[in-house]
Image: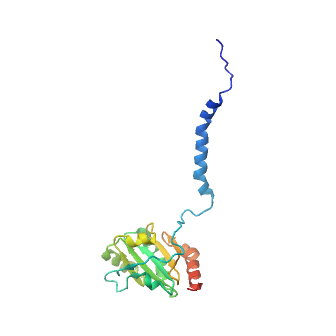
Amino acid sequence: MSTETGSPASPRRRLFVLLPLLVFLGLAGLFLSPLLSGRDESEIPSALIGLAAPQTSLSPLEGSNLPGLDSKSFAGKVTLVNVFASWCAPCREEHPVLLALSQDKRFKLAALNYKDEPANARRFLGDLGNPYQAIGVDPAGRAAIDWGVYGVPETFVIGKDGKIAYKHVGPLTPESARDLLLPQIEKALAASG
């Protein structure tokens, strides 16, 4: 009864040993490829880009003396629609950028107030300043669903033709406003529609 100690492993046994390594390498490649692609993972694509803005008719923020958000008002002018809430910390961070943008009279800055208490929204704007020319209230978040909102804050550029030209997810910073948002606004202003 002699056994060969140096005999090569059977092909089945070799596959069994290599299988976990192959699975690991496959999964590592799958998870590593998006990181190495150079694509900005914070940029979330919107299926609504190039389509007409959703039909929206939201009541005004009570006590604000501003009109509500109505998609019919988008025709013929460039409009920024900012989705905000008083309970949203990033909304507070981006607010100075919105105040600066509101100084540019070439476009209208409107708001969709998302799942907020009217008194809290008024207090938020009273404390930080009101950059908006219209504020529509979306207490249940139904309009935000139509707009494809992932979370607050988000900002949409609506062209003169009433179509969504750009969507920025997350808080605007001076850099993102300058490098991403303003070029999209310029394009929308230059387009006929």
Quarter of the image with the N terminus is top right
| Residue visible at 63% across and 57% down in the picture | 36
Q: Give coordinates of residue 16: x percent, y percent.
A: 59, 33
Q: Is residue 173 visible?
A: no
Q: Give coordinates of residue 182: x percent, y percent.
A: 56, 79
Picture quadrant where residue 141 is located: bottom left
State the count of labels.
Answer: 0
Name the residue nearer the viewer: 193 or 167: 193
Q: How is the image coloured?
A: rainbow
Q: Is residue 57 left or right of residue 103?
A: left
Q: Is residue 176 visible?
A: yes
Q: Is residue 170 left or right of residue 7?
A: left
| Residue visible at 48% across and 74% down in the picture | 155
Q: Give coordinates of residue 178: x percent, y percent.
A: 57, 77
Quarter of the image with the C terminus is bottom right
Q: Is residue 111 above or below residue 3?
A: below
Q: Give coordinates of residue 34: x percent, y percent.
A: 59, 57
Q: Is residue 9 above or below residue 67?
A: above
| Residue visible at 55% across and 62% down in the picture | 41
